[in-house]
Image (cartoon, rainbow, N blue to C red):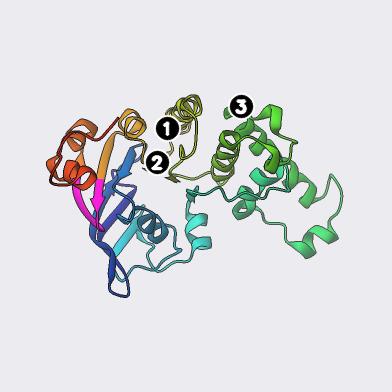
Amino acid sequence: MDVLLEIQGLSKNFGGLKALSNVDITLKPKEILGVIGPNGAGKTTLFNCINGLYRPDSGVIRFEGRPIQALGPDRIARLGIARTFQNIELFANMRTMENIMLGRHVHMRTGIFRGAAMWGRRSFAGREERAHRLTVETIIDLLGLQAVRDKLVGGLPYGTQKLVELARALALEPRLLLLDEPCAGMTAEEKQDMIFWIKDLQDELGVTILLIEHDMRMVMDISDRILAINFGRPIALGAPEAVRRHPDVLEAYLGKQERREPAA
């Protein structure tokens, strides 16, 4: 399949505010597409439309050729689209392993009653639990989280919590991963580590990634292509360096009076 995600004419309004206006995106398998723009440009609204939190007012979103713009978040997750959030959305009083296991819920077939009736390690529920834990252990090894696998998430450093949230998204086994500012609030060293992990996901797992990020250096280093939006409208799409120097991008970040390159 040449196209994994296709968005055509996507628009979303909130009253008189046009959060998105006629957005088009084509995302190829195993590609990393960065999305940049000033605060309030509509980047997170775009993600909310893709994963079903918002229903667009117009336009089509196709995933693997199937329209999904009318589906809810649970059905979209089952199709293979996972997401992280700008603000960490973990359960602070649960351990790392438990938080990551939550990402396996779309693959679990044992319900409450079946699980209660089939108790024990050799039961269907027990075998399924072990299989899911093995999958999660693989993700923990991949992201170097072994040392914190049994620790409460609320007591972990901020950068480690970001990795746990990424791990939970990977537990869904996504074909498309939406990362909303994965480096926000991180130190320079933590950002470099996150860049390494994201590139590793692309290389080792073949995951396609749509990425929102304000750190210009990070998004330039990691993206195959970049989409710049402002006031909900696309203003540039292409190779990182071409988008970086695009006059409309410079104006969006710096205004008409001072058109230098965005700070790296």
Magenta-drawn stretch contains 112: no
Q: Quick one: 244 or 256, which is closer to the camera?
A: 256
**67 in relation to 185, above or below:** below
In the picture of the structure, the residue carrying the numbered disc 1 is: 202
Q: Are marks 1 and 3 in contact (CB under 8 Å)?
A: no
Which residue is the site of mark 3?
144
Specify the amino acid type for callout 3.
Answer: Gly
Q: Which residue range is magenta in the image? A: 228-236
**What is the distance, in whole Å, between disc 3 and disc 2 at their CAs?**
20 Å
Q: Say what amino acid the circle numbered 1 marks.
A: Gln
User: Which type of secondary structure does the marked residue at label 2 adopt?
Assistant: strand
Quick check: can you spot residue 131?
no
Residue sitting at x 75%, y 36%: 150
Which comes before the other along the chain, label 2 or label 1?
1
Where residue 55 sits in the image (x, y, percent)? 39, 68
Tag 3, which secondary structure? loop
